Image: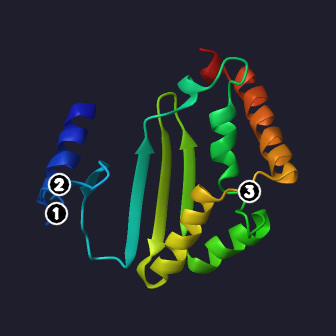
Amino acid sequence: MIKKVIFAVASFLLLIPGLNAAVDIQEFETPNGIEVWLVEDHSNPILALQMFFLTGSVHDPVEKEGSTYMMMGLLEEGSDDLDAVGFQIEVEELGAIFDFNTYKEAVAVSAQMITENLDPSVDLLRKALEQPSFDSEPMERVRGQILTNIDFDEKDPEEIA
């Protein structure tokens, strides 16, 4: 029965115009060797991007495990000229969304920006990446969040299994 339902839903989805269209992926390389995949969709006034860097928690120095996770958590805590609250206010006022993640073998930066506010949004993201603020107050806050997550994971049956 479940297979029939899945087949019916999949068949219906294929009939929706545009949903079964192939995605046009443009691939190119920047002059400094960065591989780029570009998919254009002008139906929304939003620029969404994802960047992956092949470094991650597996590269943390011995006895400094978690340093990559901590660094990525601090990227949304402000820059040289903006404290954490000021940074979050700027992000919100621009209608942007920034997300910084750590994986075992990579770190990822995702951003969604309204095209009308593209220049100031890109500038704010650049500041977060190039001029992060590693002030003690945000560092302690992020450290506390990490310790809370670790404590939760140690008690979560899905994480233990």
Question: For the residues marked 3 and 2, what is the alpha-carbon distance in whole angstroms?
Answer: 50 Å
Question: For the residues marked 2 and 1, what is the alpha-carbon distance in whole angstroms?
Answer: 7 Å
- The amino acid beneath tag 3 is Ser
> Pointer 2: what residue?
12
Tell me whether the residue at label 2 lies in contact with that at label 1, contact meaning CB atoms closer than 8 angstroms: yes
Could you say which quadrant of the image residue 155 lies in? top right
Between 87 and 149, the residue placed more toward the observer is: 87
Measuring 78% from the left and 66% from the top, which residue is drawn there?
A: 83
Q: Earlier in the sequence, mark 3 or mark 1?
A: 1
- The amino acid beneath tag 2 is Phe
- Is 95 drawn above or below residue 133 in the view shown? below
Q: Is mark 2 on a helix, strand or loop?
A: helix
Residue 16 is labelled as 1
Q: Quadrant of the N terminus?
A: top left
In this rendering, position of residue 39 left or right of residue 83: left
Q: Is mark 1 on a helix, strand or loop?
A: loop
Residue 53 is labelled as none
Numbered disc in front, either 2 or 1? 1
Q: Quadrant of the C terminus?
A: top right
At label 1, counting other C-alpha atoms closer than 10 Å, the crowd grade (few under 14, some 14-19, many 20 or more) is few
Measuring 67% from the left and 46% from the top, which residue is drawn there?
A: 73
Measuring 70% from the left and 49% from the top, which residue is drawn there?
A: 74
